[in-house]
Image: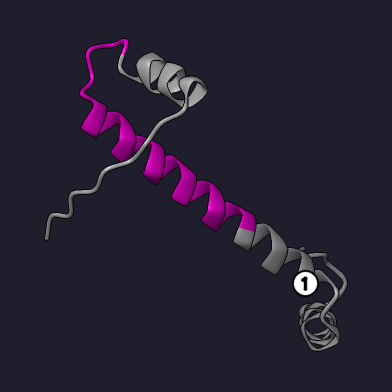
Amino acid sequence: MTTSFTVRLDDETERKLAALTKDGSSRNTAIKYAIDVSYRAMLNQQMTYESAALLKDPEDLAEISAAREAMGSGDAW
């Protein structure tokens, strides 16, 4: 599926888009690339938050402790 849309760019955003197309990339390619990069950054931020939450989760910490005890004296973590 293909979707088209129109966007109004302020001067600063237009300069940024020009920089992204300086290598000869089309505006379309630059915008799709920017969306992809932004999406990946969002996913990474979500994983960071989820990881931080797990480090504070009592149930998860109990499972880690139990796994350590089951493995013996060596530290697998």
Report how many numbered discs are placed on residues in the image: 1
Find out whether residue 31 is within the magenta segment: yes
Name the dominant secondary structure of the magenta segment: helix
In the picture provided, is 50 more to the left or to the right than 16?
A: right
Please identify the quarter of the rendering in which residue 33 is found: top left
Mark 1 burial class by Cα count in 10 Å: few <14, some 14-19, many 20+: few
User: Where is residue 19 drawn, in percent x and y?
Assistant: 40, 14
Dot 1: what SS?
helix
User: Where is residue 29 drawn, in percent x and y?
Assistant: 24, 32
Q: Nearer the viewer, residue 43 or 31?
A: 31
In the picture provided, is 4 more to the left or to the right than 17?
A: left
Specify the quadrant that holds the N terminus.
bottom left
Q: Which residues are magenta?
A: 22-45
Q: Nearer the viewer, residue 49 or 26?
A: 26
Please identify the quarter of the rendering in which residue 68 is found: bottom right
- Residue at the spot of label 1: 53
Which residue is found at the position 84% from the left and 86% from the top?
62
Which residue is found at the position 83% from the left and 66% from the top?
74
Which residue is found at the position 47% from the left and 27% from the top?
10
Specify the quadrant that holds the C terminus.
bottom right
Q: Nearer the viewer, residue 60 or 73?
A: 60
User: Where is residue 50 drawn, in percent x and y?
Assistant: 68, 68
Q: Residue furthest left?
A: 1
User: Where is residue 38 drawn, in percent x and y?
Assistant: 48, 44
Q: Is residue 16 above or below residue 4?
A: above
